[in-house]
Amino acid sequence: MENFSVTENAAGQIKKILEQEAPGSMLRISVQGGGCSGFSYSFSIDDTATLDDKQFTRNDIIVLVDEISLQYMDGAEIDWVDDLIGASFKINNPVATSSCGCGTSFSV
């Protein structure tokens, strides 16, 4: 079974973004070919789920991941990290065999 989780910090930040940008919308995360390691994550705001989307809910926010992307993120967790480099979403992905220093590109 596919599994994807959202940390408390990430849910709070997603909620802030959606309330400011598009109330009632959802965050879509997908995997696309490209990036310096072969695959990269894409984030977008969407107001409609498709039939092949899986929905993950935490604290009244919904994250959408399509079935194909979920194969590359099974067991992954999205977190919001605020450190010396800056603040950003980070995906901790157990499927990835390596990732780029940029944090948005990975290989399997």
Image (cartoon, helix red, strand yellow):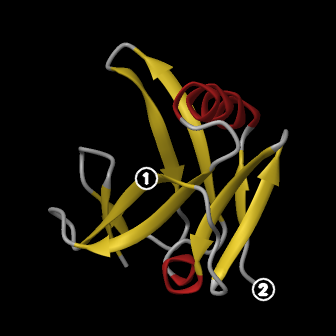
Q: Which mark is residue 1?
A: 2
Q: Residue at the location (56% across, 30% down)?
A: 17
Position of the N terminus, as image quadrant, is bottom right
Nearer mark to the viewer, of 2 and 1 = 1
Q: Amino acid at mark 2?
A: Met
Q: Secondary structure at mark 2?
A: loop
Q: Residue furthest left?
A: 36
Question: Looking at the picture, does residue 26 appear above or below residue 95?
Answer: above
Q: Residue furthest right?
A: 59
Question: Looking at the picture, does residue 21 appear above or below residue 85?
Answer: below
Q: Position of residue 69 (x, y in %)?
A: 49, 78
Left or right of 29, for residue 58: right
How many numbered marks does the figure carry? 2
Q: Position of residue 56 (x, y in %)?
A: 75, 61
Q: Residue at the location (76% across, 34% down)?
A: 8
Foreground residue, 54 or 18?
18
Q: Residue at the location (68% across, 29% down)?
A: 9
* Measured Cα–Cα span from mark 2 to mark 1: 23 Å
N-terminal of the pair, mark 2 or mark 1, is 2
Left or right of 9, for residue 84: left
Position of the C terminus, as image quadrant, is bottom left
Question: Looking at the picture, does residue 99 appear above or below residue 8?
Answer: below
Left or right of 94, for residue 53: right
- For label 1, the residue is 43
Q: Residue at the location (43% across, 31% down)?
A: 88
Q: Position of residue 41 (x, y in %)?
A: 38, 60
Q: Amino acid at mark 1?
A: Phe
Foreground residue, 73 or 29?
29
Question: Looking at the picture, does residue 106 appear above or below residue 52?
Answer: above
- Quadrant in the picture for residue 102: top left
Q: Position of residue 16 (x, y in %)?
A: 63, 25
